[in-house]
Structure formats: C-alpha cells, structure tokens
Image: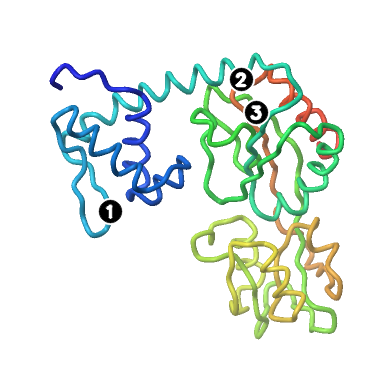
C-alpha cells in the first residue's frame, strides 16, 4: 500500500466505522466528532491510495480493499488491547474507572445497592454501569466486568457462578387466579418476541396455554409495572415481584424456572486492585 505505515489510531477509526456502519455512530463509539472522523478516514484512504468504504444512503459498506484490511486491523486491535489489559492488570491503586455490564433489572435491583456501598468504601473509583441486552466483549474491553445469565466459554475469561435468581408468577390483587393447564381468558404480560425462547416465557405458555398475550416487553420493570396496574399476569424475578405493592404471587403447583447469574472478567485484569475489591464485595453481598 504505497509503503505507507498505518498508525493504530487511524485503523481504530476504520474499525469503528466498519462495525457501526455510520460516521455518527462510530464517532459516538470513540468519543470524537463526526467531522473529525470523516477527515481522518479520508486522510487514511488518500495515504494508502485505496477506497475502503462505499458511501451509500444507508451508511458505509466495506469495499473489497476495505475487507482485505479488516483482519489485519483487528489483529492490531487485539495486540493494542492486550497491552492495555496487561498494564491495567498491574495497577494496584484504588482509583480509576471500572466499566460493568448487566441486564437492566439486575443493574437496578441487585447491583445498585452493592455499588452504592462500594462508592462509600472506595470513593476514588468511578463505576460505569451499562445495562444492555447486548453481550459485551471482555477481550475488547467493552466492559471490565460482566454479569449475565449465560456461562462464559471464552478461554481468556475468568468466570464464576454468582447467584441463582428465583422467579415467580404475579398478578394484581383482586384478579381471579388462573388454573393450572387452563388460563382461558387470562391476559398475559410476557417477553417480547425476540426473547420468546426465554425459559420463563416458554414455561408460561406451557402452564397457561389458553391465556392470551396483551403486552410484551424485554424490560422486567416494564412488565412489573404493567402487572401492578392489572394489565395481566407476569413472570418476574422474585427480587422484583416480592417487593411490588398491590400484587400477589400465584402458586400453580410448580414454580417458573429460575436462572443462574454468572460473573466474568478478562484474566489480564485479575490483579487489578479496584476490580478485586469490587469482586470481594459483590460475592460477599450476593453469592448464594
């Protein structure tokens, strides 16, 4: 490519645009302005003498040349991130930032009280909690610590089972309790169609086959709010449902399936002092 030495900072911009599809999304990802991203990309393309992206009305699409650059840029990214993780893992100072990822309801109802206590104990550590259904990448340092309901299978990730979350079936007090194996006429609040294969959604359909869905949401707090307002019956984590006012837990002879929660972090960060301190507190307060 004309003997040009490409800098990692330029390839980082290239990767962000390739992954996000637009300059705006890539700029937000890297914390830069959209005009700056555009100028850096044009400079990179001119320097190597190749067009890396096709500009379309729907966004940026890799050209053949861009697709050829992609694996090499990702290899450089892996090396750069490995250096960052190794340096971060040697940091013994109780200050700095930790980025966490969890589902929305788990962050609100389970992690927030623990993080509040941690903030009191370690006021110089900044916690950033991202609640999302998207699985964050630990090797790419999308997050330093991830809580999720699926076990980790990446060889570079250190993981442990944290806790078992029990679920229950709830409805507003005063409504008629459904019968096992029936549910005719009973309105349901359940997961959205993208999560229809979740164990609790499958269980609900099995035990109340004649019930009808009146509302769906991938947000447990939304489901809880709808249930509390009498919209329909809902399966909720008992950590949410048992604390709701004006609802009752329904016994149908069997409980909804519970879920295990797993915690994971990259092995390069295992000596990071602030991460160890948070892990100790999380396991002391939540492990079961």
Decide which of 142, 204 is in the foreground and name it: 142
Residue 70 pos. (x, y %): 28, 31
Element class at badge 3: strand
Do the residues bearing badges 3 and 2 touch, measured as CB atoms within 8 Å?
A: no
Q: Secondary structure at mark 1?
A: strand
Q: State the scheme by which the image is colored.
A: rainbow
Q: Which residue is mark 2?
A: 88
> Callout 3: few (<14), some (14-19), or many (20+) C-alpha neighbours within 10 Å?
many
Whichever of callouts 3 and 2 sits on the residue coming sooner in the sequence is: 2
**Mark 1 sits on what residue?**
59
Q: Looking at the rendering, in which quadrant would you find the C terminus?
A: top right
Sort mark 2 into few (<14), some (14-19) or many (20+) by Cα contacts within 10 Å.
some
Task: Give SS at disc 2.
Answer: helix
For the point 62% across and 28% down, which residue is it?
265
Classify 69 as above or below 21. Answer: above
x and y percentages locating residue 138 in the rendered image: 54, 31
Vertical side of 16 occupied by 201: above or below: below
Q: Residue at x 63, y 17 (%)?
A: 89
The residue to which callout 3 is attached is 159
Q: CA distance from mark 3 to mark 2?
A: 19 Å
């Amino acid at each position: 490519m004309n003997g040009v030495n490409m800098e990692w900072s330029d390839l980082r911009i290239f990767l962000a645009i390739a992954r996000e599809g637009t300059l705006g999304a890539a700029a937000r990802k890297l914390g830069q302005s959209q005009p700056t991203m555009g100028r850096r990309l044009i400079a990179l393309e001119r320097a190597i003498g190749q067009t890396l992206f096709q500009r379309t009305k729907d966004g940026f699409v890799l050209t053949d040349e861009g697709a050829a650059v992609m694996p090499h840029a990702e290899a450089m990214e892996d090396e750069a991130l490995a250096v960052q993780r190794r340096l971060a893992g040697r940091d013994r100072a109780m200050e700095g930032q930790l980025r966490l990822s969890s589902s929305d309801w788990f962050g609100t109802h389970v992690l927030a009280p623990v993080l509040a206590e941690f903030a009191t104990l370690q006021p110089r550590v900044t916690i950033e909690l991202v609640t999302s259904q998207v699985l964050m990448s630990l090797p790419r340092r999308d997050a330093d610590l991830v809580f999720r309901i699926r076990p980790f299978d990446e060889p570079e990730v250190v993981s442990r089972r944290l806790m078992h979350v029990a679920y229950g079936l709830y409805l507003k007090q005063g409504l008629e309790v459904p019968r096992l194996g029936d549910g005719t006429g009973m309105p349901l609040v359940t997961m959205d169609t993208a999560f229809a294969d979740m164990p609790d959604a499958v269980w609900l359909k099995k035990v109340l086959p004649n019930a009808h869905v009146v509302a769906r949401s991938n947000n447990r707090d939304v489901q809880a709010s709808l249930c509390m307002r009498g919209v329909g019956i809902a399966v909720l984590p008992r950590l949410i449902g048992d604390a709701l006012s004006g609802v009752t837990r329904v016994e149908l002879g069997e409980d909804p399936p519970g879920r295990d929660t797993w915690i994971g972090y990259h092995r390069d960060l295992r000596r990071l002092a602030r991460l160890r301190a948070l892990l100790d507190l999380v396991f002391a307060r939540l492990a079961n």
